[in-house]
Amino acid sequence: MREPAIQPTNRECFFPEDEIIVSKTDLKGHITYANRTFLNVSGYSEEELLGKAHSIIRHPDMPRCVFKLLWDTLEAKQEIFAYVKNMAKNGDHYWVFAHVTPTLDANGRVISYHSNRRVPERKQVDLFAGVYSQLLAEERRHPDWREGMAAATKMMLSVVSQRGMAYEEFIFSV
């Protein structure tokens, strides 16, 4: 029997600026490690998180295209930075500035992923809340979710390229 979906509360929760949320996942995105800060902020116990898909904390306000970019970048063995709105077990949300990296073995093969998340500045949260709202609206405009994700991805990359920057430059320029 599936557990009922968590409903967003529209309440934002915070974590101390001097703390870092850390998690590790396997190649399929299942959590293999969660630090104490992650447990405290998300409201989940270690037992509830380990082995679960990292998307357990995905907030419905997050557009799919952001995660597509994340996975495409990681599969290319590159690190990625992103602003992400996550959802705690109780439905509250929290924003993070995420740095996600692939972990490589001695032969250069990706064997897992590692993510550090910090408290973002409020101006970035406000900016990306607006950007993500537009991207999500574009995704929802299409009856097929794949078409919506592709259209929103194109829209996101267009915004970045109009500034004459690569994605990573854009993330650090705001």
Image (cartoon, rainbow, N blue to C red):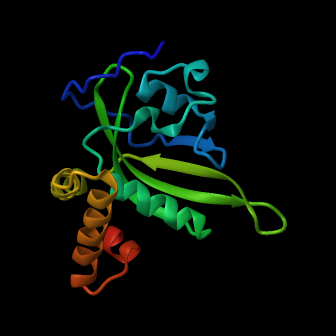
Residue at image location 62% in from the left, 28% down from the top: 50
List x then y, in percent, for residue 150: 32, 65
Q: Residue furthest top?
A: 1
Q: Residue furthest bottom?
A: 164
Of 122 and 93, the residue lying toward us: 93
Q: Against 2, is 152 above or below?
A: below
Q: Against 106, is 48 above or below?
A: above
List x then y, in percent, for residue 20: 49, 43
For residue 6, side relative to residue 141 (left or right): right
Residue at image location 56% in from the left, 63% down from the top: 74
Of 18 and 88, the residue lying toward us: 88
The quadrant of the image that shows the C terminus is: bottom left
For residue 50, side relative to residue 9 (left or right): right
Q: Against 78, is 110 above or below?
A: above
Residue at image location 20% in from the left, 27% down from the top: 11
Q: Residue furthest right?
A: 106
List x then y, in percent, for residue 135: 21, 58
For residue 36, side relative to residue 7 (left or right): right
Q: Against 12, is 2 above or below?
A: above
- Residue 101: image quadrant is bottom right
Residue at image location 25% in from the left, 42% down from the top: 61
For residue 69, side relative to residue 53 (left or right): left
